[in-house]
Each structure stands twice: as structure tokens, then as C-alpha cells.
Amino acid sequence: MTASEQNRGGLRPLIDDALDLFVYAPVGLVASSLEELTAGDVPELAEKGRGRITRLLSNARVVGHMTITMGRRTLSGELSRLLPAEGAHGGATHLDAPPAPEHRAERQEFLRSVEPAPDLAIPGYETLSASQVVRRLDGLGEAELLAIYEHEAATRRRRTILHRTQQLLGNEGAPGPTSRPA
């Protein structure tokens, strides 16, 4: 037997295995699934599909949220580099001239929305859900709780976080996000 015949002999089973795995097995799976499918199987299959799609969408939402957070931080850094602070220079140009009164609140709201979160005692605070934040509050000191309360009241105003920080600070009766802990 020549070397060429040995290579063909060793290569042939490898090709057959690849065809079995990537062509014939998937076709056989679909064919047998369609033959055995009954009307009673549809709700179960729909539930499996719904669960899988829900997980995929949930993961996409988390990735999207992280992308937006990082984009805001980048944009904020670029804005602070390109736009000088109001009143920082003596000579006014079109960039550092104070905005018209009707646009001042919009600009402040925009800048507050793109500012990165302050260094809070909980790492990754902006990416956590309210329930994840609440679980981490118990071990924090008063100053850290106050910082989280003020940040949350100024930004997302999630009631579960605001209420729990009030409880831990001893202000359980305080009504809602507009009140501040003493």
C-alpha cells in the first residue's frame, strides 16, 4: 500500500465522521422531531422557546445597559474636556457663554445625566438592580449610606433603595425620595 492510499484511507473515516456530525445528524433530528410532534407538545415547546428567548433578551438588556453606562462616561469625559466649566474664563465665546435661561435647566439635566456615578461604597453601583443594591447596604457606614441616598435621590430615585437607606439611617418614617435623612 502506498502513502497516498494510506492517507486516503485515514482521511475517509474523518470525512464520514464530519458528515455524520454536521449534516446527517441534524437532518435526522429535524425529521424525527417533525414525525413525533403532536398537538400536545406545542405548549411545552413554546414554553422552552419563551424561556430561551427571555434569557437571551435579558442578557442583551444587561449588555445594552452596560454599553450605555460606558458611553455616558466617555461622553461626559469628552464634554468636560471640550466644554469649559461655566464662568471659568473671563472672555466669553459661543462655547462658554451662559445658556439662555430657558435652556439652562435642560443643560444642567443633560450634564447630570451623563456624569459618571461618584465613587460609592458599592462597586458597579450603576449596573446593579435595586434588589442587588439593597442586599449590599447592611454593611455600610452612615456616611456611605448618605452618599448612596443622595446619589439615588438625585438620579434614578428607586424607592426600594431610598426606603432601605432611610431605615438603616433610622429615618423609617420619612416620606419618599424628596425628604432627606437627618
Image (spheres, rainbow, N blue to C red):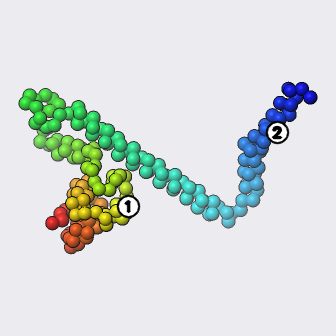
Does label 2 or label 1 sit earlier along the sequence? 2
- Residues packed near mark 2 inside 10 Å, few (<14), some (14 to 19) or many (20 plus): few
Residue 128 x, y percent position in the rendering: 37, 56
The answer to the question of whether label 2 and label 1 lie on touching residues, with beta carbons closer than 8 A, is no
Residue 128 visible somewhere in the drawing:
yes
Which residue in the protein does label 2 denote? 13
Q: Nearer the viewer, residue 59 or 41?
A: 59
Whether residue 68 sits left or right of residue 23 in the image: it is left
Res 77 quadrant in image: top left
Residue at 28% x, 46% y: name it: 116
Q: Secondary structure at mark 1?
A: helix
Which residue in the protein does label 1 denote? 132
Q: Nearer the viewer, residue 32 or 17?
A: 17
Q: Label 2 amino acid?
A: Pro
Q: Which residue extends farthest bottom? A: 173
Q: Nearer the viewer, residue 1 or 128?
A: 1
The quadrant of the rendering that contains the C terminus is bottom left
Image disc number at residue 57: none
Rounded to the nearest whole Å, what is the CA distance between mark 2 and mark 1? Answer: 53 Å
Residue 64 x, y percent position in the rendering: 42, 46
Looking at the image, residue 10 lies above or below residue 179: above
Res 108 quadrant in image: top left
Residue at 72% x, 47% y: name it: 26
Residue 42 x, y percent position in the rendering: 65, 61
Q: Label 1 amino acid?
A: Gln
Q: For the image shown, how many numbered marks are present on the structure?
A: 2
Whether residue 48 sits left or right of residue 7 in the image: it is left
Q: Secondary structure at mark 2?
A: helix
- Residues packed near mark 1 inside 10 Å, few (<14), some (14 to 19) or many (20 plus): few
Residue at 37% x, 58% y: name it: 129
Residue 122 x, y percent position in the rendering: 32, 56
